[in-house]
Amino acid sequence: MKFKMVHNNFNVRDLDKSLQFYREALDMHETRRVTASDGAFIIVYLGDNAHGTHLLELTWMRDMDRPY
C-alpha cells in the first residue's frame, strides 16, 4: 500500500504570529480557514503553491492558556 502525506498539524498559541512566521520563513500562505461557530477554535491551512497539494494546518484554540 502506498501512502501520501496530505497535511500536518501544529497547535499554535498566537495565530497571527504563526501566520507571519510561515509566510516570511517558508512563503506559505493561507488557502482555507475554518472558524467554530462559537469561536472555540480557528483552523488555518497553509500552502506554498510550489510543492503539490501538501498543506500545513495551524490550529488555534481559544481556551488554551499555556504553551503546548
Image (cartoon, rainbow, N blue to C red):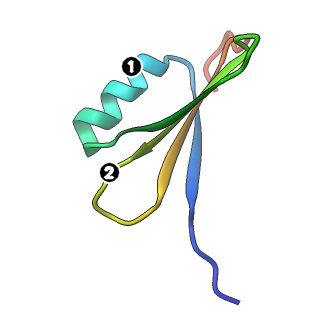
Q: Nearer the viewer, mark 1 or mark 2?
A: 2
Q: Position of residue 3 (x, y in %)?
A: 63, 79
* Location of residue 41 with respect to 55 vertically, above or below: above
Residue 25 figure quarter: top left
Q: Is residue 36 above or below residue 29?
A: above
Q: Nearer the viewer, residue 64 or 38?
A: 38
Q: Which residue sits at x=56%, y=55%?
A: 7
Label for residue 26?
A: none
**Element marked by disc 1:** helix
**In this picture, residue 44 sits left or right of residue 46:** right
| Earlier residue among tags 1 and 2 | 1
Residue under the point 58% across and 74% down? 4
Give the quarter of the figure containing the C terminus.
Answer: top right
Image vertical order of residue 8 relative to residue 52, above or below = above
Q: Residue at x 57, y 51 (%)?
A: 8
The residue lying at 45 percent from left, 62 percent from top is 53
The residue where tag 1 is placed is 17
Which residue in the rendered view is the most extreme toward the bottom? 1
Q: Position of residue 64 (x, y in %)?
A: 70, 15
Question: Is the N terminus in the top left, top right, bottom left or bottom right quadrant?
Answer: bottom right
Say what amino acid the circle numbered 1 marks: Lys
- Which is more toward the observer, 5 or 10? 5
Indicate the quadrant where residue 66 lies. Answer: top right
Q: Amino acid at mark 2?
A: Asp
Q: Residues within 10 Å of mark 2 (few under 14, many from 20)?
A: some
- Looking at the image, which is closer to me, 66 or 36? 36
Left or right side of 9 for 41: right
- Residue 27, quarter of picture: top left
Helix, strand or loop at mark 2: loop
Q: CA distance from mark 1 to mark 2?
A: 18 Å
The residue lying toward the viewer, choosing from 61 and 42, is 42
Residue at numbered disc 2 = 48
